[in-house]
Amino acid sequence: MDRNTVIAFALAAAVFIGWEVFVAGPQREAYEAARRAVAEEQQKAAEAAAASGQEGFAPAIAASGVNGFAPAGIAADQFVTVEEALADAPGRVDIDTPELIGSINLAGARIDDLRLKKYRETIDPESPMIRFLSPAASDHGHYVEQGWVAAGEAGEGALWSAPEGARLTPSSPVTLTRQAGSLIFERTISVDEKFMFEVADKVRNTGDEAQSVVPWALVIQRNIPEDFRDFLILHEGPIAVVDAAKFERKYKKARTAIVERAGQEGWVGITNKYWLAAAIPPQGESFMADLRNVGTQEAPIFRASYAMDARNVPAGGEIALTSHLFGGAKEVSVLQDYESALDKGGLGVRDFDKAVDWGNFFILTRPIFYTLDFFGKLTGNFGVAILLLTLVIKALLFPLANKAYESMSKMKKLQPQIKALQERHTDDKMKLQQEMMALYQKEKLNPLAGCVPILIQMPIFYALYKTLFVTIELRHEPFFAWIRDLSAPDPTTIFNLFGLLPFDPTQLPAIGAFLGIGVLPLLMGVAMWFQTKLNPPASDPTQQMIFNLMPIMFTFLFAGFAAGLVLYWFWNTALSILQQWFIMRKNGVDVDWGERLPFMKPKAPAPGE
């Protein structure tokens, strides 16, 4: 790796910092200012409505008593296992679909028991299914619930009844009922082939007076999930989309942060790396989204909820409301299908694919994902898809790279003249620089042109890293042989002779993460070392030492990266070597590998031969 490469990495870092300081930072500040302004306007409107006796938006769910706590009698430090919590429910309705298996708790009609049939905890197909939702009484309770505030009771945890032997499948909806005073609630729950539940409610007033009811829904996450690792590039925690604006708070920040926003389109939920639980109000109707911690700092209960306008149920009358609940994997195509308008077979859920954390570089991450997904479906192998994606990127960048490599080839031709200048001005660095710049101008050569390919590659590299990290489509996807999961690091390591020795060095504290140097990182390091040998030696010994160490440093650094990312960098480097070699030969620069690689040098003749 030559000086231009080091400069390119420095420039790439400057680009990222500049983006943060001059673009992303001001955007966040403007967004926060707008959010505060909207909140102030909403507060003023609420105060004016209260003063005038008008109800306006429904009160915040917290004020209505719908707090999302565990059932009465369970203290914060007294949890039971998931199995015990499931058995303790007053009744359950089984759920069985091609994607999901679980049950509905008749206490609150909560969906608090879901496992994902297609997704396993490890790459072993016999490993347990991912448990996505779990009862409130368990240590990490995670569930979705929908209800009505009516007649002085919030409705949370209210007991519903179901027909004997009821079972929810895509072809058999389930109807639940309950009564609160003169109000009779009838709920029909249906589920599709994927992860969406439709909840069709009817509220009938059998009394002599009109009743006011407020519809609400919430998603609860009790405590921070066990597998939460607080990745810098990933959002996990409460999230809401309201009228195209996305609001999100990571778990740690969500302990104290509160988000309230009114709108007519959107959804609320709690998202993890690959999974999403969301409550979706009827699109086009007013609702108030609310994200907050309703527990304590030590024992948080994260809640994403919405409340709609109060509805009037006349005496002897009936009202109806249909909304949706989502619980499952964040498969991009599925989210976008739900996002499609009703006339296209979707639900018209506003910006539902924003549940996937595409990041600030979504202009790159989305196209990269779509290209990978296309090639993955075409070839049936996402490893091959990464190789094809690399070819596409190289083709798109070929004109720039071609120009850069031609510039580097010209630099090589000038090496004898540059070396002569260095020998002539060994004690006058200023004069040496002036002479070299004059030489570059004479030859119409830009010494920094070689930085361009690497500088452009850095955002692409980051976008691919982000895509491999956040999209479930690449989770547990194999390549070939020992690479059984492209989203995880190469499982082999040279420090146990690739599995011959019975210990795992990656489990060592502090240094383990840097010891997982498998076959793929080694191949990448070798390719980078070959690429450095195409470049002329640096005049400064310290610089030359740094250049020689860069492939080794990158091998250790990339050892902990996803295998798919290392595969991309290795294949990109290999293609760059071929491209650079071809252009050098085209420009008359002789590439003598025997001269550049010590192990290929001919053996010196013995004395007397």
Image (cartoon, rainbow, N blue to C red):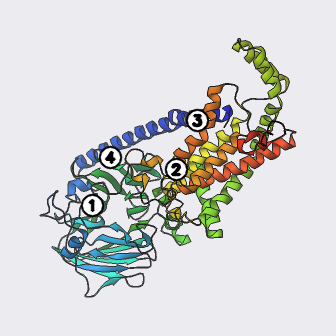
Residue 609 in sight from this viewpoint: yes
**Residue drawn at point x = 67 percent, y = 48 percent:** 573
Q: Mark 4 or 2, which is nearer the eye?
A: 2
SS label for mark 3: helix
Side of 374 where 122 appears, left or right: left
Real-space Cα separation, disc 2 to disc 1, in angstroms = 32 Å
Tell me which numbered mark, 4 or 3, is placed earlier along the sequence. 3
SS label for mark 4: helix
Q: Mark 2 or 1, which is nearer the eye?
A: 2
Which residue corresponds to mark 4? 252
Point out which mark residue 140 bears: 1
Tell me which numbered mark, 2 or 1, is placed earlier along the sequence. 1
Q: Crowding near pointer 4: few (<14 within 10 Å), some, many (20+)?
A: some
Give amino acid for label 2. Answer: Ala
Real-space Cα separation, disc 4 to disc 3, in angstroms = 28 Å
Give amino acid for label 3. Answer: Val
Real-space Cα separation, disc 4 to disc 2, in angstroms = 29 Å
Q: Give the image location of residue 257, x and y in percent.
A: 31, 44
State if disc 2 and disc 4 touch (CB < 8 Å): no
